[in-house]
Amino acid sequence: MMIRVMYADGKTEMVRPPLLKLLIERERIRQFRRDKGWAVLGEDPLRRAQLHDYRGPERRSR
């Protein structure tokens, strides 16, 4: 899956999710496209990294 991102200069491109995460962490993009429109960094809620670093027991069914 590719995600459209917009840089501060207005340039857009398509990136893969791991690169999107890196661009967000390094504050290299202004916004990225979601199904319901553009998500603007600093204005719209984003997933927190700690949600993906769960250290408890596995609870998902296999």
Image: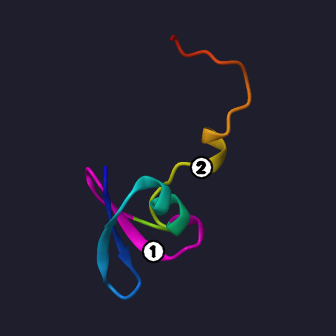
Vertical order, 19 against 12 (above or below):
above
Dot placed on the residue nearer the N-terminal end, 1 or 2: 1
The residue lying toward the viewer, choosing from 45 and 53, is 53
Mark 1: secondary structure:
strand
Chain part drawn in magenta:
24-39
So how many labels did they put on this image? 2
Q: Is residue 45 left or right of residue 13?
A: right
Task: State how far apart marks 1 and 2 are (Cα).
Answer: 17 Å
Which residue lies most toward the top here? Answer: 61
Determine the residue positioned at 73% across, 30% down: 55
From the viewer's perspective, tell me whether residue 57 is left or right of residue 33: right
Rendered image quadrant of residue 2:
bottom left
- Residue at the spot of label 2: 48
Find residue 31 and report its horizontal and vertical position in percent: 39, 69
Q: Which residue is mark 1?
A: 29
Name the one closer to the observer, 45 or 50: 50
Does the residue at mark 1 contact the one at mark 2 (Cβ under 8 Å)? no
Task: Using the image, determine if residue 41 lies above or below residue 61.
Answer: below
User: In the image, what residue type sits under mark 1?
Assistant: Ile
